[in-house]
Amino acid sequence: MVNANAPSHHRASDRADLLIGIDQGTSGNTALLIDRNLQVLARASVEFPQYAPQPGFAEHNADEIWSSVRRALATVVEGIDPARLAAIGITNQRETTFVWDRDSGALVAPAIVWHDRRGSDWCQALKSLSADTRARTGLPIDPYFSASKIAWLRQKYPGRALAFGTADSHLLRRLSGQSLTDPSNASRTLLFDLASGDWSPLLAARFGVSDVALPRIVPSSGICAQVHGVPELPDGLPIAGIAGDQQAALFGQGCFDAGQAKITFGTGSFVLLNTGTEARRSQHGLLTTVAWKIGNETHFALEGGAFVAGALVAWLRDGLGLIQQAAEVETLAASVADSGGVTLVPAHAGLGAPHWRPDARGMIHGLTRGTTRAHLARAALEGIAHSQCDILDAMAADLGAPLTELRVDGGAAANDLLMQLQADLSGLTLLRPRMLETTALGAAMLAGLGVGLWSDLAELRHAYPLDRVFTPQQSASTVAAARAHWRDLIGRA
């Protein structure tokens, strides 16, 4: 482990106008180099594998994650004067769990990925405490979140002195030697009390992890550590931005005010609504989560996420062999006018918000001899869109009024057919910016704000250049029939 107290060698000059944003994702890592005008000067993405040792399990090799981060960094900083680097920001897959030995610093097991379901039995045993836990954390007791993953590892390695961190903590340890996280990530663990803004000893005891060391919580924006001992970066470079991927996307989309919302289409898909400084409690299966903390002010969000979105397209490619490249799904799905009566429910990893059914399984309904792979491809895109509509319906019920507009981002947001289907089924106008990688952008923006590259949020407010606006095209009666059929099938998944 590097010495976190080593002398700083990096001296930011008056020319320090560049920011690095790292997006540590589920299937790969992306690094962006941007300037103070939010122009992307360099970008690199490096994939890494995910492992499934048995059904319901999903793991990462932490060393492979770090190696791919370094490769991405090496690409974006090539030829850049280090004196121009102002800060680095980190965003990450959130609930994925890393546990290491407190004495040696060595990881004791592969990282357990957010959609891993091995904690299901543990969560089921605590269902009687679900209401109290939700009141404290804003989250249901579900194996999606980190606590049951930590508990599983605690039981597997009895007697060892263990420490836990999410993916941001893993990168911060490698970058600076410090074990840190921010409130947006901490609020995804089931161990963070929204009222106190800190770890809860009661919740740690509830999950049997009181003796597991937790990372120190720091604001989402502000210098929290300095880079040391990383060949690709100068020693002393400030690390000044941390946020979970969905919160970073909300920030990167410029949704700074209460009432603004975005939807990110990635491996999973997520809707976040900024609720300002109020931790608004959902009555319809959504999550209350920290959006970010800047200075002493914490912003909160309502969130709903579907576990499977881009992962469904990957399954069509890798599991069924219907396509060779993910990008082919749009052309294939667009080759038919509709799904031919086929409905695909993407509950391959259970159902997330607002259903919270880890026992649910994926379903393909309505197959006939006339069904083709094109119908399956279109049904898959419709299934992704329907899953988001379930979340949007719950959000409207919580707000007492429907949303009218959503900003969209993430890799699958480039799929025009999916975006039109989403607009049609939700009845909402979708705004798609030219810059779809708003997670890494948001991390870099938080870092720039943290080192004073911008004086306040007012300097960051601007009209993002739009690529396209999608407006609803289908009739209300057609949409109502499709949604009713979907709700019937969801109940049987």
Image (spheres, rainbow, N blue to C red):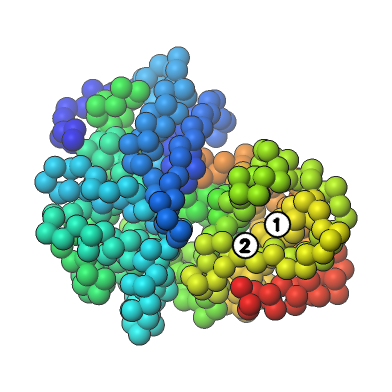
Query: Residue under circle 1?
Result: 380
Query: Residue under circle 2?
Result: 346
Tell which residue pokes out farthest to the front in this image: 369
Residue drawn at x 15%, y 49% is 102
Type of amino acid at the residue the image marks with label 2: Pro
Q: In which quadrant is the C terminus drawn? A: bottom right
Residue drawn at x 17%, y 48% is 101
Visible residue check, residue 453: no
Residue 455 pos. (x, y %): 43, 41
Task: Describe residue 384's horizontal placement relative to residue 182 as left or right.
Answer: right
Seen from the viewer's position, the closer of residues 489 and 395 is 489
Quadrant position of residue 463? top right
Bin the neighbour count of mark 2 within 10 Å (Cα to Cα): few under 14, some 14-19, many 20 and up.
many
Q: Which mark is residue 296?
A: none
Residue drawn at x 78%, y 71% is 482
Residue drawn at x 62%, y 53% is 312
Residue 240 pos. (x, y %): 35, 40
Task: Describe residue 476's horizontal placement relative to residue 385 as left or right.
Answer: right
Helix, strand or loop status at disc 1? helix
Among numbered discs 1 and 2, the one appearing first in the sequence: 2
Residue 19 pos. (x, y %): 44, 31
CB contact under 8 Å: marks 1 and 2 = yes
